[in-house]
Image (cartoon, rainbow, N blue to C red):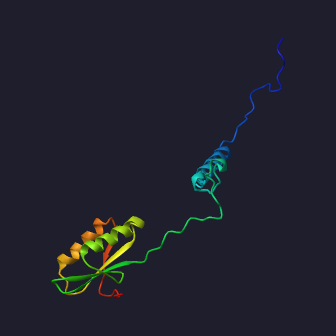
Amino acid sequence: MKVPSSYQGGRSSLEIQMTPMIDVVFLLLVFFVWTAGFQIAEYILPSNVSAAAGNAVNPSEAPPPEADFDNIIVRVQGSTDQPQWLVNGQAMASLNQVGETLARIAKIKPDAPVILHPDPGIPLGTVIDAYDTARAASLKKVQFATSGTPAP
């Protein structure tokens, strides 16, 4: 025997509205994608690691801050025969010594800005040699002084 149904006479129209559900799912997806990029990497966080092994980090001991460099000004002065080299006001005996000084600076901070400031009577070849020396020292920012740049 068949049990009589309460829906005799036809089916009732039962519709499920999908638009609000899709909107909620989309908003949840956007929220999780945006917040996933703001997680802090664990290796950046300070921590005490294995005190028993002797590798404990003292939280009161902060690492020394990196020295902030001003512009490194390389002056080329003197006559066309024998130019005089100055690096931030310190006299250098030759272009090789300038290169050694710039190489030491490049080991500390390779993106330190270098400004080449030649006197008006210096030949272009000497200035190009100074530029090549700065680039050979692995310095990335080598610029030329303009007429408006004050001499140190």
Q: 48 and 37: which one is in front?
A: 48
Q: 52 and 88: which one is in front?
A: 52
Find residue 79 and report its horizontal and vertical position in percent.
18, 87
Q: Quadrant of residue 140?
A: bottom left
Q: In which quarter of the image is residue 2?
A: top right
In this rendering, position of residue 55 left or right of residue 98:
right
Q: 88 and 127: which one is in front?
A: 88
- Vertical position of residue 78 compared to residue 41: above or below: below
Q: 33 and 87: which one is in front?
A: 87
Find residue 152 and report its horizontal and vertical position in percent.
36, 87
In this rendering, position of residue 82 left or right of residue 16:
left
Q: Quadrant of residue 123?
A: bottom left
Measuring 64% from the left and 60% from the top, which residue is drawn there? Answer: 58
Measuring 25% from the left and 74% from the top, which residue is drawn there? Answer: 95
Residue situated furthest left in the rendering:
81
- Vertical position of residue 15 compared to residue 90: above or below: above
- Vertical position of residue 39 compared to residue 137: above or below: above
Find residue 33 and report its horizontal and vertical position in percent.
59, 50
Find residue 98 and report its horizontal and vertical position in percent.
29, 74
Q: Which quadrant of the figure contains the N terminus? A: top right
In this rendering, position of residue 82 left or right of residue 116:
left
Residue situated furthest top in the rendering:
1
Number of numbered discs on residues? 0
Measuring 58% from the left and 56% from the top, which residue is drawn there? Answer: 44
